[in-house]
Image: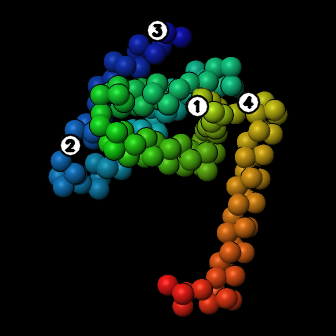
Amino acid sequence: MQQKMKRMKKRKNKLKLLLTDYEQIEIKDLLATIKEMRQRLKILFKFHIGFENSTSPAEIFNNVFEVNPETLDPYMRSYWWRVLQKIMGALRHDSDLFIIHKGHKYFVLRTGEEAKYYKSCLSRTIVGLKQSMQRADEWVKERKYLQI
């Protein structure tokens, strides 16, 4: 497995997005970069199926961007981590790769127990969204906007 990880690091296509002047990026380059990130995530997560083979966010960041996240300033690191999370969500939505996280570990869903954990997280989110919908209705009904 370590040999495969070393081969992954010897890529010709380096993601230079972290060190680029954003005004010079064209849409086609950005789309190619997103496609490359998706591909790198697919390769990385071949080795992280199931919770027992989970990986850390720092390892994901390092393997996709080939940069240690600790070397970046916190805002840049946070921004690019959110980009990676959106791409992982898109992979899950497209049914290409079902990546979930438990605590600070990320892995590809494998067992029924892991699926049950994921569904319980979704259930908690749904409850919160329903409460937010109720608060929105109350806000309008009670005309709270007039109290601003």
In the picture, the disc for residue 3 is: 3
Q: Crowdedness of circle 4 by 10 Å Cα count: few (<14), some, many (20+)?
A: few
Q: Are marks 1 and 4 in contact (CB under 8 Å)?
A: no
Query: Which of the 4 image quadrants contains residue 109?
Result: top right
- Name the residue carrying label 1: 104
Q: Earlier in the sequence, mark 1 or mark 4?
A: 1
- Name the residue carrying label 2: 20
User: Left of 118 or right of it: where is 97?
Assistant: left
Query: How far from the left and from the top, in percent, is residue 28?
Result: 29, 52
Q: Earlier in the sequence, mark 2 or mark 1?
A: 2
Outermost residue on the front side: it is 147
| Distance from Cα at disc 2 to Cα at disc 1 | 29 Å
Q: Which label lies toward us, 3 or 1?
A: 1
In the picture, the disc for residue 110 is: 4
Q: Are marks 2 and 3 in contact (CB under 8 Å)?
A: no
Q: What's the residue type where badge 3 is placed?
A: Gln
| Distance from Cα at disc 3 to Cα at disc 1 | 25 Å
User: Left of 76 or right of it: where is 115?
Assistant: right
Residue drawn at point x = 64 percent, y = 87 percent: 140
Q: Earlier in the sequence, mark 3 or mark 1?
A: 3
| Distance from Cα at disc 4 to Cα at disc 3 | 24 Å
Q: Are marks 2 and 4 in contact (CB under 8 Å)?
A: no
Q: Earlier in the sequence, mark 4 or mark 3?
A: 3
Residue drawn at point x = 81 percent, y = 39 percent: 116
Outermost residue on the top side: it is 3
Q: Earlier in the sequence, mark 2 or mark 4?
A: 2
| Distance from Cα at disc 2 to Cα at disc 3 | 30 Å
Q: Which label lies toward us, 2 or 1?
A: 1
Q: Secondary structure at mark 1?
A: loop
